[in-house]
Amino acid sequence: NKLSSYRDSLPILIVYLFSLVLGIEVLSHQHTHFSPYYETFFLLFQTSIFLLTSFKAYSDYKRGL
């Protein structure tokens, strides 16, 4: 049961990572470019969510050990 919380958070990490990669692809291939501020905000937003989620999963995993 030690890895259960970590395994529960793993799909969330995969989804966030996938959405980050997908967002980068969409933004880089857009013909109508968004403003650089929007792209920077998007990347920072996605990265912060990903880091927070991974940190929570890691702390839950360490607490379970």
Image (cartoon, grey):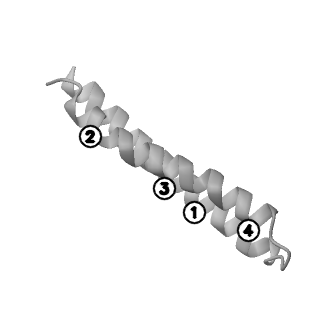
Q: CA distance from mark 1 to mark 2?
A: 22 Å
Determine which residue is flagged by label 2.
Answer: 8
Give amino acid for label 2.
Answer: Asp
Residue density around tag 3, few if under 14, some if 14–19, many if 20 or more, within 10 Å: some
Give amino acid for label 3.
Answer: Ile
Instruction: Using the rendered view, name the quadrant where residue 6 is placed.
Output: top left
Element type at mark 3: helix
Q: Which mark is residue 39?
A: 4
Q: Is residue 9 above or below residue 65?
A: below
Determine which residue is flagged by label 3.
Answer: 49
Q: CA distance from mark 4 to mark 3?
A: 15 Å
Give amino acid for label 1.
Answer: Phe
Residue 20: percent from left, percent from top: 60, 54
Q: Residue at x 41, y 40 (%)?
A: 55
Q: CA distance from mark 1 to mark 4?
A: 10 Å
Residue 35: percent from left, percent from top: 80, 78
Determine which residue is flagged by label 1.
Answer: 45
Q: Nearer the viewer, mark 2 or mark 3?
A: 2
Give amino acid for label 4.
Answer: Glu
Q: CA distance from mark 3 to mark 1?
A: 6 Å
Check if mark 3's residue and mark 1's residue have beta carbons within 8 Å.
yes
Is 19 left, or right, of 60 in this rendering?
A: right
Total numbered circles: 4
29 or 41: nearer the viewer: 29
Element type at mark 1: helix
Q: Residue at x 80, y 62 (%)?
A: 28
Sequence-first disc among 2 and 3? 2
Residue 11: percent from left, percent from top: 37, 44
31 or 40: nearer the viewer: 31
Residue lying furthest top: 65
